[in-house]
Amino acid sequence: MADPTERPVPPRWTRRTWGSVGILLMIHSLLLGGLGAAYSPTWNEPGHLAAGYRIWETGRVDLYTVNPPLVKALAAWPLLLFGPKTDWSQISPDRVPSLPSIVCFCRTTMTHGRG
């Protein structure tokens, strides 16, 4: 029978154990980086989401008219649950077609990124 006052010896981590943990963490980091690159939004996705949210909020389809509005509206409906702050005052109907896509993207990102 073992002595009840004797402490159990904790397991010892050898160099091999630390090396294995390090390799696993490196593989995990590479996999996360690959997934992040593969599944992150593309450069124009925020513009589509902003245009879809504007469809829900104002009923207008004149923002970011590169694609038909149905898919943008369907992709943006979850935003209705959160109700982000919007400021469409700088976007007028006569000015929207002349705005390049990247300008719409930048304004939308800056407006909604401020929280």
Image (cartoon, rainbow, N blue to C red):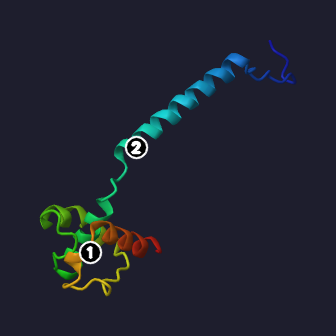
Q: Nearer the viewer, residue 104 or 69?
A: 104
Where's residue 22, x and y in %?
A: 63, 27
Residue for badge 1 = 99
Determine whether 7 is above or below 70 in the image. above
* Frontmost residue, 63 versus 21: 63
Q: Give the percent coordinates (x, y) of residue 20.
A: 62, 21
| Residue positioned 36% across, 42% down in the render | 38
CA neighbours of label 2 inside 10 A, class few (<14), some (14 to 19), many (20+) = few
> Does dot 2 land on a helix, a strand or a loop?
helix
Question: Based on the displayed image, in which of its 4 quarters is residue 70 positioned?
Answer: bottom left
x and y, in percent, of residue 112 in the image: 40, 73
Q: Nearer the viewer, residue 8 or 40?
A: 40
Please say whether residue 78 is visible from this viewpoint: no
Q: Is residue 86 left or right of residue 33?
A: left
Can you tell which mark lies on residue 37?
2
Residue at left 81%, top 15%?
A: 2
Q: Residue at x 16, y 79 (%)?
A: 60
Q: Earlier in the sequence, mark 2 or mark 1?
A: 2
Quadrant that contains the N terminus: top right
